[in-house]
Every structure is written in structure tokens, then in C-alpha cells.
Image (tube, rainbow, N blue to C red):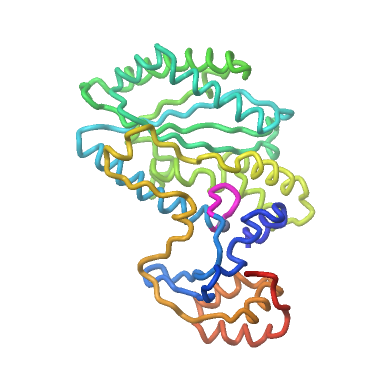
Amino acid sequence: MLQSVARRFLPNSRTDKCLRLRTKGKEIQVWQSTEYKTATYAGLQTCGSVWACPVCAAKIAERRRAEVVAAMAAHKAAGGCMLLLTLTAPHQRTDLLVDLLAKQALALKKMFADNTCRKVFAEMGVLGQIRALEVTHGRLSEFNNGWHPHHHLLLFAGSGVDLARFDEAQRKDWAARLYLRWAACCEGAGLGTPSFAHGLKLDDGSKAARYVSKWGLEDEITKGHTKKAIHGETPFDFLRAYLGDRSDKQAGALFKEFAETFKGKQQLRWSPGLKKRYAIGESTDDELAAQMDDQAAMLGTITLEQWCDVLADDGRATVLMLAANGGWDAVARYLQAISGKGQRPRTS
Ligand SMILES: [Zn+2]
């Protein structure tokens, strides 16, 4: 349903065609996960957009999460520890997202080249990091500061240093020294001065999980952009807002600005050599989005004529819900009921 909203704002994009057009030479199938009982399509094109497509983003995030979990486990087994560094820069309601992103990228580049920062990272025993990009928007808050892009850096620390020194006092000292440099880098990039309270956060990885239960560091960096934001709205919150209230034109406009600006940007960036060190494979977002669940069984196939009916009825989500809950009989009854609604498509 959210994807159907997204495509309204992104006509002629790959997300517009995602899970609508058939993959050349393939038949359209519905599969069910034996483990989770959820249903998915096979034989349809996928867009692989980690930013704009709620369906592909969910798949990619889940598979990236497994990579992060594996790397963290290997790092801890090798005697290391995790630290989470969050960097935020000042922003105003009138800022364009594209400008903020460019300036933040420059500030980050300065930060990583900075001698003091390198020294602090060396004291922490950082041998690599995974950088996650995220954005929220403050239009619903009392003080609307507009777009709020920020970075989470998962630091693979504790290598070749004494872990007994990693206490709170030491972490506060590192955070203060890094903050001073981050503030200078932001100023140098034309962003203004971040506040001491919000500009930089350095958390102990073992305690940084935002929620007590299942949400861990790996979720924070792989799924942050898809969740419901605690402060402000994530881009997918705009889609939820529009789904709930079709007169919310602003949600659509902001989603469009976001999708166009973030297109092609990496959501997760591993520092050079880190994947190799922990034997994590290289796979693209496209590959992950197209990957099938290993533990799944095929329920049935849909003809091209029937698929046209489904598209005409905006029933792609309905088919999956029926398949998951009522099996193929329920899907067949639905297909019968909407028979003749669509016309033959322009697809391959
Ligand atoms: Zn997609």
C-alpha cells in the first residue's frame, strides 16, 4: 500500500514499475515463506531502491542487517568492542535538502582528515566503521527546523588498545575532543555551529540500543530510515501520512524532494577493507531486492490477463494478504471477482 503511494509521486521511475511489470520471460508467481507465512511475488521487476521503495527497502534492510550482525560478532570475538557516533549539523526550515547533504558530506570529509580526530580514533583502537545516512523532517514539531539529515557511525573499536580504559569518563573526554573538531568542520563547510548537546553523541555500543528488546545497533543503522521516527518524520512517514490523509499535499512534495535528492546515494558505507576483514560478501541493493527467500513455497501463478485485473483494481497488496491468510483458494476467488477489470498491459 505504501509503495502504491510512493509511485504516485515518482512517475516513470523504477519504483513506479517495481512489482508491476513482469520480468521478461518469467511467469508471475506468488510464494509463501514457510517460516513467517508472509506472501511475496516472483517474476516481477524490482527497483532495488533503498530510499524510495518501501518494499525493496524492507528487503534490503533485513539482508544488510545480517551482514552488520555478522561483522559485529566477528569483531567482538576478536576482542573488539563497538561504539556508536552520531553526527548532526544545524539546519533551518528554509534549507534545501540537496544543499544540506552536500555541506554535511564536506564536513564529514574534513572530519576524517582531521589530525585530532585521527588521534582520538587511534586511542579508541578504531580499525574501521560503517556509516549510515538518515534523514527526518520536523514539519510537525513546534519549532519546525525542516530537513534533518544526520549520520550514524558504527565504530569497530578496541583493537590493540586496553579495553579497561573504556569507561564513561574516557568516553566523555573523547566525545568532547571530537565535538570541538566536528563543530569546526561544520563551520568550515558553511553549516554553522552545532550545539554541544546535539551535535555529536558517542555511545557505548553495548548500551546504545535505543529500545530494550529487539532493536539493536544493527537495526539502528540499517533500518533507521524506514522506521517511524520518534522525533519528526522519516520519508516513509510521509507516505503513511498521505495514505491516512490524501489532502496532505505537503507530505507528497517532501517525499518527492527526498527521493530525488537521495537517489543513487549509499545508505550504508563500510570503510575500505572492513568487509573483507570479516569475510562479508559484496552484494548490490539490486541483487538483495531481487533475492528470494530460501524458505518459501510457491502457492500459485497469475496469468498476464489476471495481473492486468489486479493492477486495475490496485489489488497487489490484497493478493498478498489473501495468499498469506486464506491460501490460494482465497486468491483464486478474488481473481475471479475482478476478472475483466483490466486491459492488456504495455509491458514486456
Ligand atoms: Zn522496489
Q: Nearer the viewer, residue 191 or 25?
A: 25
- Residue 100: image quadrant is top right
Would residue 49 appear left or right of 31 to someone viewing this image? right
Q: Quadrant of the C terminus?
A: bottom right
Q: Nearer the viewer, residue 312 or 169?
A: 312
Residue 260 at x, y percent in the picture: 66, 43
Residue 14 at x, y percent in the picture: 62, 55
Reply yes or no: does residue 35 show up in magenta: no
Would residue 215 appear left or right of 28 to someone viewing this image? left
Q: Residue at x 61, y 23 (%)?
A: 90
Would residue 155 appear left or right of 310 to someone viewing this image? left
Q: Quadrant of the N terminus?
A: bottom right
Residue 249 at x, y percent in the picture: 78, 49
| Above/below status of 270 relative to 298 | above
Residue 127 at x, y percent in the picture: 30, 28
The range drawn in magenta is: 48-55
State the count of labels: 0
Give the quadrant of ligand 1: bottom right
Q: Residue at x 68, y 58 (%)?
A: 5
